[in-house]
Amino acid sequence: MSGMIIEGMKLRVDELFYVVDAVQQNSLSKLMFLSPLDAAQKKIGGANVKVLSHQELTRKINNNEASFYDQSTSHLTGVPFLSDKQIKDQEMWHSFVVDHLARHSKNYTSNANIDESRMLFDWNKFNSKCFSKSTCQAKVKAYLDSDKDPRKLINYDAASCNKGKKRFTQETEDIIYDFFMDYYLVRSDKTAKSTNKICDLICIKVKQLNKEDPVKYPKVPSKSSIYRRLADIEAEMVINRTISKQKQKGLRYKLGREYIGEEPLERVEMDAVYINLGIKSETRTYLGTLAVMFAIDTCTRCIVGYSIKVGKKVSESSDLAIECLKNIVMPKENIDWPCNGIPTKLYSDATTATKGNGYKIMALGLGIMPLVTVSYSPWSKPFIESFFRTLRREFLSRLPGYLGSKTRVNNAHLEQGETAEQHASMTLQEFDEELQKFITQTYHTSGHGGLNQRAPIDVWQKKVSENPLLICEPSPKFIPEHFRGGVSMNHTLYKNGSIKLKNEQYANSELKELSMSGVEKVDCFYSDIDTRSIVVRADKTFVIVPIRAKSHHDEVGFQQAELDVARIGKFNDISSSPRKHYSYKKVTRGLNNFQKMKAKQAENKEHETGRKKPNKLKFDNTKSIDMNDSNARDQIMNAVRAAEADESKNSTMPEFNVGDEL
């Protein structure tokens, strides 16, 4: 990290924001002189300068007490600035919760205690109504669950970001943002178009699509609506001020330079996408849906890494980010996917996936600058967001059992009670193979609008062939396998040299030696995505321990659940590529007939539980034979002869003479 701290860099230290004024190298360490910043990213005059050592800053970053932040945006934190109303609400709820906790030492959320605090609290002091019991219970629980963080007592109202904007369909929004990517975020005046020209192009495009498909493109956006979306780019607010045209060009160049790297791996964007696709194991057991983290190189638009997690309540985790970072850095087994290396800047959301110490330590150890962007701000990472739209449109929509994005909000195409489990048909291995096939054979080899219709893989290979030193790999001393997302402290080491973790057993000779030397407790670092091995730490010794072969079964595998350079003339020496489309190997795609499938599942369930039994045979007692009757023998023989006659009458065997050809 020592080479990353430079003058002008902006940091958050504790709860305040600073800019690096100077870096002084001593014989023992490196000192950084930081000046405080205000909300407009300006130095605060007369404020005290903070001095930090390199070791202290590293420790604070690892403990979430400090972080680099995105310099291309005016927001200084991962949370939007609070309005006056939000500040007032926060004061009110904080006062309520503090009074409530002081009054009751236990049973904080019981109905009687909450009702008592509601009646005794002075709501008029804050010009507010008396809130319901359930709301007060939720506030108390949120405050306690967040370790008494008052920021959790208010709603940040992400929907207010869209206030005053017209609502368009997702397809129309995709067209608008694709034009911004291909014509606005470029660094050449010869190919970059004015905002007014971009608005004209968007309107013409949507008019054409409206005639073809009026359902997806029902309304042609006005120029004012498009200008509002341009305001999402923070630098655009500065450009819209009354300044000279020359200064506008300079600011716009700086904006494009901030978003698009000059060389591969200069700027990489990483984010996760939730996929409503049910996954089954090899034994047809339902495992859950998917969370996939992707990393994209903004210079070449190549996908440089990904990681997958499956679960019935799957979510982003530090494990997902670490495995994705490993995939970015290390060479891939797929020979058609040569994209890997150490990024200079790695942009990600302010989520739990990238807040973990393991992810930060690994990134800083590799010399990567992990930058956190503003939450709910897609313009902070426009290229990965654009790829997600392509992924859903060109790949996921063609897979069997995919329910579509945002099914909880837009689920008009689903029946009541329809879930991903009922449509699950693919295994994790099948999805992984199809995903790699889409990336390497379709996305990487298709002409990209932001690359002047050049294929991302062609741009990558040309850049790397011109300067092979662009691709830096970890030093031999750096072992990515030492990093895991989960940790179990003071874990028991058994005398036979084994460890039981997540219902699996891990053992090797080194653990046996540790147990024989008297070690009983160790720290285990594990991954829910790759369960083939764990990392064990005893004192300062790290050991990679594989899973025991005899405990391996079908449910164990790679996963614990189973087991987009700007469009300019510099690419003229690369031939253009046609746009390709992914097709799934099987004829069946999309969703099955829900009603038939539901009826079949119900029938199978009844048979399994024994609630549905075969119909009883009915007997005609009038045709029974009394064995005590004197002519019982004659009745039996008549019944036998009648049965034989019926059998010969219904026989399908053809008549033939002896010796004839069969």
Image (cartoon, grey):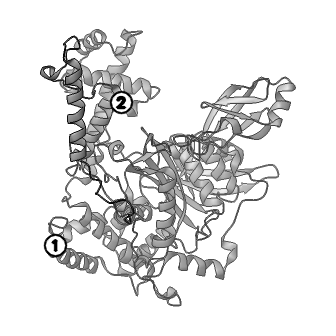
Residue 357 versus residue 335: which sits nearer the camera? 335
Quarter of the picture holding the N terminus: bottom right
- Does 326 sit left or right of 375 as displayed? right
What amino acid type should be assigned to the residue bearing mark 2? Glu
Residue 60 versus residue 210: which sits nearer the camera? 210
* Mark 2, other Cα within 10 Å: few <14 / some 14–19 / many ≥20: few
Q: Residue at x 40, y 69 (%)?
A: 582
Instruction: Tell me which numbered mark, 1 or 2, is placed earlier along the sequence.
Output: 1
> Which of the 4 quarters of the picture holds residue 391?
bottom left
x, y percent for residue 624: 18, 20
Residue 624, numbered label: none
**Residue 234 in view, yes or no:** yes
Quarter of the picture holding the C terminus: bottom left
* Mark 1, other Cα within 10 Å: few <14 / some 14–19 / many ≥20: some
x, y percent for residue 322: 59, 49
Please, what secondary structure does the residue beneath circle 1 have?
A: helix
Would you place residue 569 above or below residue 143 in this image? below
Name the residue furthest left: 622
Q: Residue at x 19, y 78 (%)?
A: 208
Q: Are marks 1 and 2 in contact (CB under 8 Å)?
A: no
Would you place residue 545 above or below residue 203 in this image? above
What amino acid type should be assigned to the residue bearing mark 1? Asn
Residue 608, numbered label: 2
